[in-house]
Image (tube, coloured by chain):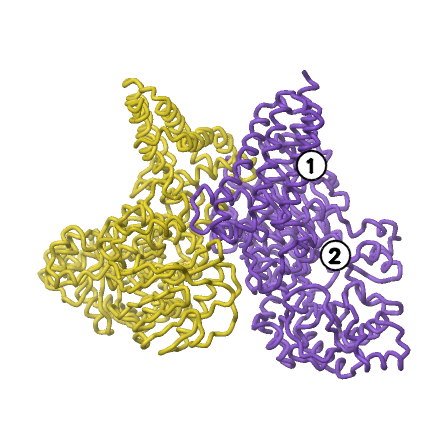
Chain colours: A purple, B yellow
Amino acid sequence: MVPAVWKSCTIALFLLLLFGDTPVRGQSPVALNVMPLPAQFELGSGSLKIDGGFTYAFAGFRDARLERAGQGFLATLSEQTGIVFGHSPADPAKTALLITTDHDSKPVQELGEDESYTLEVSSSGAKLHAATTLGTLHGLATFLQLVSVSADGFAATAVSIQDQPRFPWRGLMIDVARHFIPLKVIERNLDGLEAVKMNVFHWHLSDNEGFRVESKKFPKLQEFGSDGQFYTQEEIREVLAYARDRGIRVVPEFDMPGHSTAWFVGYPEYASGSGPYQLERKWGVFDPAMDPTNEKTYKFLNEFLGEMAKLFPDQYLHIGGDEVNGKEWDANPKIQEFMKAHNIKDNVALQAYFSQRVQEIVVKHGKTPIGWDEILVPGVSNNIVIHSWRGTEALATAAKQGYRGILSNGYYIDLGWSAARHYEVDPMGGAAANLTREEKERILGGEATMWSEYVNWENIDSRVWPRTAAIAERYWSPQNTTDIASMYLRMEAESTRLAWLGLTHRSYQRPMVLRMAGSAPAAQVEALLEIAEALEPVKDYNREATPGEEPTSLKPLNRMVDAVHPESEVSRQFSLSVDQFVAGSCKNPALAAALRARLTKWAAIDGQVQPLAQNSILVKDAAAASAAFSQAAEIALTAVDRIAEGLPLPDALKKQQTDALAAFETEAHKSTLTIPSLAAFQKLVDASGTGGACSAAK
Amino acid sequence: MVPAVWKSCTIALFLLLLFGDTPVRGQSPVALNVMPLPAQFELGSGSLKIDGGFTYAFAGFRDARLERAGQGFLATLSEQTGIVFGHSPADPAKTALLITTDHDSKPVQELGEDESYTLEVSSSGAKLHAATTLGTLHGLATFLQLVSVSADGFAATAVSIQDQPRFPWRGLMIDVARHFIPLKVIERNLDGLEAVKMNVFHWHLSDNEGFRVESKKFPKLQEFGSDGQFYTQEEIREVLAYARDRGIRVVPEFDMPGHSTAWFVGYPEYASGSGPYQLERKWGVFDPAMDPTNEKTYKFLNEFLGEMAKLFPDQYLHIGGDEVNGKEWDANPKIQEFMKAHNIKDNVALQAYFSQRVQEIVVKHGKTPIGWDEILVPGVSNNIVIHSWRGTEALATAAKQGYRGILSNGYYIDLGWSAARHYEVDPMGGAAANLTREEKERILGGEATMWSEYVNWENIDSRVWPRTAAIAERYWSPQNTTDIASMYLRMEAESTRLAWLGLTHRSYQRPMVLRMAGSAPAAQVEALLEIAEALEPVKDYNREATPGEEPTSLKPLNRMVDAVHPESEVSRQFSLSVDQFVAGSCKNPALAAALRARLTKWAAIDGQVQPLAQNSILVKDAAAASAAFSQAAEIALTAVDRIAEGLPLPDALKKQQTDALAAFETEAHKSTLTIPSLAAFQKLVDASGTGGACSAAK
């Protein structure tokens, strides 16, 4: 076996077979088209043919869950390949894939169970072996990734894999409060998590904008707190079973004492203000907070959390705890009186008091509390888990104090960052790198967080996928798995496979663009589709900071900013080509021609988009970005010509163009969009300033 | 009110607003973007704003079905627009859309019920009125089609509509025997039927390749006849309810005495041969047929049809009756003896005897038999309905004899014809045009037929839609609604709307192409996507006639022929541009440039596809067509240049190129594909022969 530092492997022939002329695209090759990359693997020779005669069989432990896993595996393999497989499970002695599981995983999936598996694939057959069902599920996911089409038909790469996760807590959080996310969307995202071996679905079920769970004890929670958009307990049990079948724990979150306006619409008596309360339609930190000084609050929480502790079987229960501004506490004389009487010196201490009480309730109901950074206060029990939105510094500090933690800072997928940027964040990075071995073991993993201010049923998949696959690799694969080019190649391949699971991260865009275009002529529609592929939403929290934007949860998400990919693959490819070009390939006429063709197209887009912006309110919003983009592309096009011809750009003109490019980005922001190719455009301008490599070579 | 002969309308301003520069594309404008076009309409001024405050309310009759219809209407409107609507139904006095229904439709939907409605939309509000719930459903479908995006937001066109169908029987048949079609695919196709006002779903439930219904009385039918792929009675009841909610009758078909091999796998005793029988994997006319001389056959059919008559509430029950080759009858001495004894002179007479007996059983169970042409034999009861695969001649003959009939000849959507070709077929055309008024009334309508030899869950939507929308218009709209250009414009708009219902007729293609491409570089994938958009499957029954093809129901449908659209919109647009160009617009530099750009792209495709064909077995199959297509495009490109420059093509060269183009089509057929732009290429060659209009103008 070779370690997974495959960068140095000499497997040129294999790569050639796999990727044809890919290296022209300026990316490094991949050894194994699997994501997350296994802990250890060794490539074999040949491959295992996959045709209509392919079969699998179980040996060792087997139960209904494994049967379903087998059927699901075959159904996905059928979608991936288009092949119709036979319906009867095969004879273990003669099967193509023999699946041996030693024993079942725990009845309620636990943190830190054995998830390892080995998978041996050769031209004569495949063997999957795992200690528990969890490992079997992961091995099946890997097998699906090994299957690709070749000149002879479909086949699974011959390989020997020994695999296990780096971190035991690998999660995705979905906020269903700001925008309600329907059950079927949740379920297909669980399919996605299974495919990339994530094992935690953190369900952010309540916030100021909505309370999304049916409580039978306190029905006014959902009746008044959800606009009718909530999950019934029956639906939740469906999701729990669905997740268990996929090796995924479900951790529910009830955020308190802040982020809780939605609770108070039905039950204002537990708030610190005088009410009445209405659902928030905007987002941010609001004043309403639970009353920590009212014993009835704890009585209510005891009953409510008791109900939820029964509904959700997982050991962990997330109690939120973030972002309390304390204004309602300051304004309430009774609370102030209580604080004085109990020697509680400030709001931080008051929240610590509340947090302590709630944690006791959670523990009483047999659960382990997890909460955001704020719950870590002096003296709090070591049993809790810290969920860090603050960062590795906070996490490391907690670990030193004996607290376990998971990291989400750096994995906020709502911020529109590139996959590479998330990929570079490591739960064991920063201050955590200097921890002792024992302290390091307290860092359990991380969670990608899908806050839902700007996502709904229609575009959420595109914000989660494929970037979450890269984050999943960070949590699963060895720490030295860091090659960005390899990550992107494998992520794009995984993206294609994820589409077979019904995820809409690729298919969502075209209908949204057609909606924007209305009955526009084909050329205008095509231009709009080009824009949608090439631009990105503004990053971080710049959308709500844009003048004219007044985001609320009722405002339609039907504009260009909602339709563009968080990371434009077209622009990424373009930027790679530019890097090649300015690095000395400017004499490559095919490359120059490809850049020219792309830039010519981009430069022409705005001529089509502006008339459309006159006819559609949804396009109007993107008009500023469209104009800026086409003009910027025009500058880049001129630069390509100069570089190819070795004509240096005069300094004054260079400065003018540099300023212009910067101004175009500002223009694009007016449309709440960014131009991700702008850095590449600037590189072209910079290179044309020197006359470029072609000039030097002359 | 003006009649629907809208071609002569002078509504230039309206069109300009609606379609921008569309006329450049060489198509005639449309008066109202609705399909099927209403019987009568008059455009108003302005439009009704559709924003988050839009509401509807019911007046008159109301029940749970109407409530569901209202909710479904609003959900679709929300998908179309991206707008979040309020959740409470509005006050009738203040609502934007007031829906008045006089009374419910029949408890079991009947042939010929009142389906009319009126819809008045003005800038101040809309009123929908219908005699029955069926009309209300149609009116809501129309309203959804009136909504489009404008510079001010979404709005419904102001219009006054009086609408009713031309024919009472407007159907789609889906064959679920050759390939099983899952329930959810059936249901989304019912959504599509509702959108275009079709009212019959004809469910072809049994054939040689599969028996797809659970029989509780004869469970071996599905156990042995379906590979486990059948609908339970509970699932069927779900579909029946789903269809009823959408104003659609469900007519089940049990094809007999031929096309029945699947029955005999479990029950060989009712066959005319000695068995044992296995499911057919190929298609065509096979020997197995029921034994018409065995009384037990009728006892069995009596019990079975009795069970099905209870399961399916519709008045009509389809008994098939087509294509019996009689070989098993000829070979069975007992049957020959019976024929002699009963003076049955030939197999036609024997089938007539069988048919008569089965019809009696159907009638006994309270149903009206419908069957293919073959059931019309001298002396058969006038109560039956003839379903004609033979054509209008047969239908007219039947009508003269007093039989009612529906037409499917000309509506075989499995044959890959253009929408225009189906659109030109009229149930009242051909011999039917000369019938008396009374005879004409016996022609009830028609059905598009989706035979499933080459469709499965993945591509069936693309074979049904959008072309079935054009057929739906033929059945619904006045006979003089025949403008092809208008039809295409409205069909494409409807195609976009149909995608919001979850139909995959547009989104299916990209995943299939990515599957074919495997890990190929982006340029190769793009070329393959271009091919997929530009080519079409071979037409009629030429696929199975292609050397090397051995189609069976187990063979994957994962090649290019399965992924291309039956009618390429890209090629159709290209052909329209060529028509413009050769008709005298060759001096239009933008048009010439657009043609050149398109042809240059097409000519370059094969350079990308051939390397891919080396690496993927799925692409290999398309290599011949790819090469032919690019070479043909190269010829057309040269022709464009010659025409633009006014350089006449020498006759010898012209002949050479004409021959080459014909040969390329033959080449493409080797890939079971056709090049739909070939006629346009030939037009360019022909025009370049004369030097074209540009030459003449010089």
Q: Any mark on residue A413, and which?
A: none
Label 2: state its secondary structure.
loop
Residue B472 placement (x, y as % from top left): 30, 56
Q: Is residue A228 above or below residue B223?
A: below
| Marked residue nearer the N-terminal end (2 or 1) | 2
Horizontal side, residue B550 vs residue B411: left or right: right
Horizontal side, residue B650 vs residue A423: left or right: left
Residue A695 placement (x, y as % from top left): 68, 19
Determine the residue positioned at 76% across, 56% down.
Answer: A407
The quarter of the rendered structure image containing the C terminus of chain B is top left
Residue A243 visible to an observer of this rendering: yes
Question: Which residue in the structure is indicated by mark 2?
Answer: A408
Label 1: state its secondary structure.
helix
Determine the residue positioned at 61% across, 56% down.
Answer: A59
Q: Residues within 10 Å of mark 1 (few under 14, many from 20)?
A: few
What chain does mark 1 sit on?
Answer: A
Q: Residues within 10 Å of mark 2 (few under 14, many from 20)?
A: many
Q: Is residue A535 above or below residue A307?
A: above
Amino acid at pointer 2: Ser
Amino acid at pointer 1: Asp
Question: Which residue in the structure is indicated by mark 1?
Answer: A659
